[in-house]
Amino acid sequence: MIQAISVTGLAVFTGFTGLMSLGHAAFIAVGAYTAAICTKTYGLPFIAAIPLAAIMAGLVSLVIGIPTLRAKLRSDYFTIATLGFGEAVRVLLENLSITNGARGLASLTKYSTLPRAAIALAIVVFLAKNFVFSRYGRMAIAIREDHVAAEMAGINLFNVRLRSLFFSAVCAGVGGAFHAHYIAFIQPNMFTNVQSTLLTASVVAGGIGSLTGPVIAALLFASIPELLRAAEMWRLVVYGGVLVAIMVLRPQGIFGYREINHLFRRKRPAVVAEAAGSSADGGDDS
């Protein structure tokens, strides 16, 4: 669920806005360190550290978002920029005294529990749904489909993309706060490009244009390595095999452009036929 919190934010940015990011591990790291410093150094309660971690991660996203999105970087160029930004943040954390450098922060209190993580995930998914169905969410979808046509229609590409990036970074910051207080130890080398790649893989495998799909994929990809931990190195082979199988058998992702509630919506043929008959009768009477 902690992994799914961060994936939900990236699903909004990548799946609905159409920009690929390989630097979201940096926002997770910022959220993790902010929450850890707040609780360990300053003695703040965990419930107060979570929003601070989210806000800090959101502010850091502006550092990379404003220059790159204003320059209208897209596709591979933006992805490379986020990749370099993620590495820069990791190196910065290794050389700051407040983060204890490469040694990291240890002996953190385990505030992260299953009920708290479940509540946080539900709130994040609810906010993501509201964002997607808001005015800015619909503009983000238009930009994803055709950014040239969207700009000609009067949509501010920079404004919409920056809002989407900020929201995804806030979600990653919340996930980082829970991650730090679940492992009870953090150091910079835990937040590498590998973690960013796994987040992106969850979004793509779950389905571009879906919120619940990436969440299910995140739960699946986080569970497989743990369930097969006894298999040692072979568990990563199985992990990769599952990802390849999804890409081959379901190139549109597990859910594609659908949400999980659409799977349970089935029209009853009798009702549909009856409704069609009623419409025909009404047309004859008129």
Image (cartoon, helix red, strand yellow):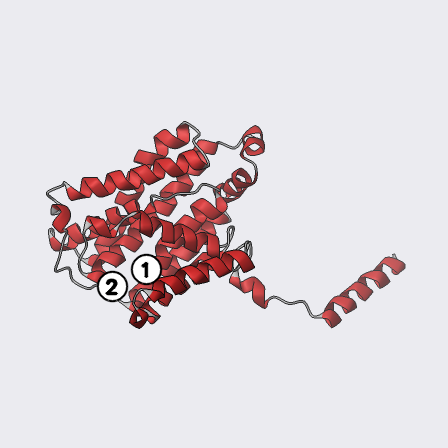
Where 277 falls versus 99 (above or below)? below
The residue that label 2 is drawn on is 112
Quadrant housing residue 8:
bottom left
Q: Does dot 2 land on a helix, a strand or a loop?
A: loop
Q: Amino acid at mark 2?
A: Ser
Front one among 256 and 76: 76
Left or right for 96, reference 166: left
Residue 96 horizontal/vertical position (percent) = 13, 41
Q: Amino acid at mark 1?
A: Ile
Task: Determine crowd level at label 2: few under 14, some 14-19, many 20+ residues with C-alpha closer than 10 A.
Answer: some
Residue at the (30%, 34%) spot, across then down: 63
Q: Residue at x 31, y 37 (%)?
A: 84
Q: Which residue appears farthest toward the right when viewing the image?
A: 284
| Quadrant assignment for the N terminus | bottom left
Residue 2 image label: 1
Taking depth in this image into account, of 215 and 275 the one nearest to the observer is 215
Q: CA distance from mark 2 to mark 1?
A: 9 Å
Query: In the rendered image of this protein, does residue 151 appear above or below residue 206?
Result: above
Q: Residue 220, position in %: x, y?
A: 41, 64
Task: Decide: few, some or many residues near mark 1? Use Cα within 10 Å; few <14, some 14-19, many ≥20.
Answer: many
Q: Secondary structure at mark 1?
A: helix
Where is residue 236, by image quadrant?
Answer: bottom left
| Left/right of residue 70 with respect to residue 97 in the rendered view | right
Point 89% across, 59% down: residue: 284
The reply to whether the C-beta atoms of the residues labelled 2 and 1 are less than 8 Å apart is yes
Whether residue 267 is visible, yes or no, is yes
Depicted 202 relative to depicted 73: above or below? below
Measured as percent of width and height from the top left, residue 134 is found at 49, 46
Give how far across and how far down residue 17 sits, in percent.
48, 42
The residue that appears at 50% across and 61% down in the rendered structure is: 245
Q: Earlier in the sequence, mark 2 or mark 1?
A: 1
Between residues 280 and 120, which one lies in front from this camera angle?
120
